[in-house]
Image: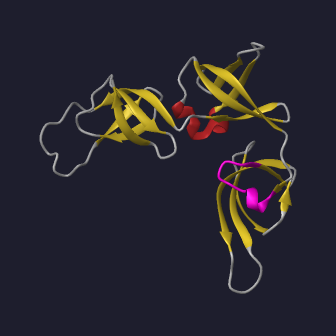
Amino acid sequence: MYSTTDFRKGLKIEYNDKAWVIVEFQHVSPGKGSAFVRTRLKNLETQQVLEVTFKSGDKVPIPDVEMRNMTYLYNDGTNYTFMDSSSYDQFTLTSEELGDNKYYIIENSPVAVTFYRGRPVAVEVENFVVLAVAQTQPNIKGDTSGGGGKPATMSTGLVVQVPFHISEGDKLKIDTRTNAYLEKVR
């Protein structure tokens, strides 16, 4: 059992017989009354977001989740196929089940897949990924005083604001938590 003092971002808990991940949490100690924890939970199966308040000291069960290292194979348009490296079993997830994580995985790359009660429900991605620029405007010289940028479409379909000097084919380091360009990789 987890206590509310164990809550942190990314912790997987069981609530109402379903697996949830904590997206946000805040410990609140009002001047009057007892302390509580305000959380925003995301359902691992349906991606539904729910706001729940727990009394300080409440306990919640640990869900039956398992993390497996797998390889992302391909996307057939609607489904994303993954293969277990040890047993060679293949599983598919839809783009809705992957959410924004579909923009951070490239073919034949290793990923961690979360299984809930034996069924794949989510994919964990690294905090930083390297993606190639598939399409962007040509380089623009001058007008660097504003410090602005231009949109660039990455090889996975993700659109990121990048500096003017970035061109097609460049490899960029992207922060998966904020969708932000970090640096050009050589």
Judge whether 149 appears above or below 131 on screen. below
Instruction: Count the numbered circles shown.
Output: 0
Q: Is residue 98 left or right of residue 2?
A: left
Is residue 66 left or right of 107 when viewed as pictured?
Answer: right
- Relative to residue 109, is residue 9 depicted above or below? below
Residue 102 location in percent, x, y? 57, 33
Q: Residue at x 58, y 36 (%)?
A: 101
Direction from residue 66 to residue 82 in the image, left or right: left
- Residue 6: in magenta span: yes
Is the residue 148 above or below the residue 93 in the image?
below
Q: Is residue 69 above or below residue 122?
A: above
Looking at the rendered image, the quarter that the C terminus falls into is top left
Residue found at the very far front of the displayed protein: 5
Where residue 122 sits, quadrant-wise, is top right
Question: Residue 144 vs residue 42: left or right?
Answer: left
Q: Which residues are magenta?
A: 3-12
**What residue lies at 67% left-to-right and 30% top-to-bottom?**
112
Is the image coloured rainbow, by chain, by secondary structure, or in one colour?
secondary structure
> Which is nearer the eye, 114 or 93?
114
Q: Position of residue 64 (x, y in %)?
A: 85, 40
